[in-house]
Amino acid sequence: SRDGSMEAVRLDPDYSEHIQLPGSVTQNMVGNAARSICLWARIREWDNAQIFEYGSQGTAGTDPATLFGLGIRKEPGSFFVTNHPSEKYNVTIQLSDAEWNDWHHYCVTYGPYGNTPGGNATFYFDGEPASSWNATVDTGTDEPLYLGADTHTERLLNASLDELYVYSEELPASAIYELYVDVTAPPTTMKPTLAPSVSFAPTVYTYEKHLIAFYPFTRGGVGNAISPVAS
């Protein structure tokens, strides 16, 4: 895990490992509803995989897919956000190979009216907005949120995951930065034993009322640490 303990989950595509969350996690984040999905990940292999995805797969030739998700391509630092059947927005982050072999914080936010200059959808990397764009979002309801796979349970991710937060609002940049720095406490390479081994759901921030789910992955377990909050 990020702090050297067992407070994370490891996904191995050789064993078809992925996580399917309950449908209640995303039931208020369909259509063009606002949303924010944030998590830590240590990506071990860049191989056209899915970090998360949910929505409807559609039917070839009749109904288009209506999906929302974050994926990676084969080049380190190459990401794409799926926000509509005809739209995959590409984002590239430049880091060294050594830097990619570490934990990083990822967030995708969307709101019909947009909290971030530049568009209504934003991809955040390590607490900072990496790119914003105007997205057409119409997410379906058929498939719940998958971690480490697409909704076909394909495009399997070789990675470790930690600290998943799901919100039914488009968090502003200041909240994303707070989540990165203060709530989930980024790791330190200088003194890893000082990083917290157990994180907690936020209780003092103004955006708490829109927090739908928090998965700390304690000892590799998959459980929502909070009761779903109506937004």
Image (cartoon, grey):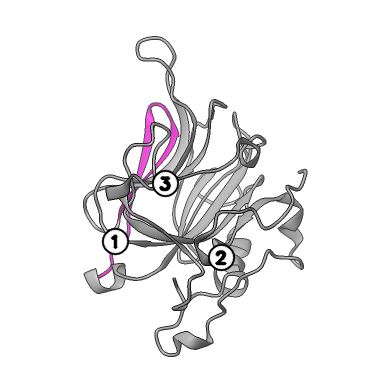
Relative horizontal placement of residue 155, taking residue 180 as reference (left or right): left
Mark 3 vs 1, N-terminal side: 3
Relative horizontal placement of residue 32, taking residue 146 as reference (left or right): right
| Location of residue 144 (image quadrant) | top right
Q: Position of residue 118 (x, y in %)?
A: 49, 48
Mark 2 vs 3, N-terminal side: 3
| Location of residue 184 (image quadrant) | bottom right
Q: Position of residue 127 (x, y in %)?
A: 50, 66
Give the Cα distance between marks 2 and 3: 16 Å
Give the residue pinned by disc 2. Answer: 218
Q: Secondary structure at mark 1?
A: loop
Relative to 22, say whether 174 is above or below: below
The magenta stretch is 78-96
Give the residue pinned by disc 3. Answer: 18
Q: Are the residues tagged 3 and 1 within 8 Å (C-beta)? A: no
Q: Secondary structure at mark 2?
A: helix
Q: Residue at x 71, y 55 (%)?
A: 226
Q: Which residue is farthest top? A: 62
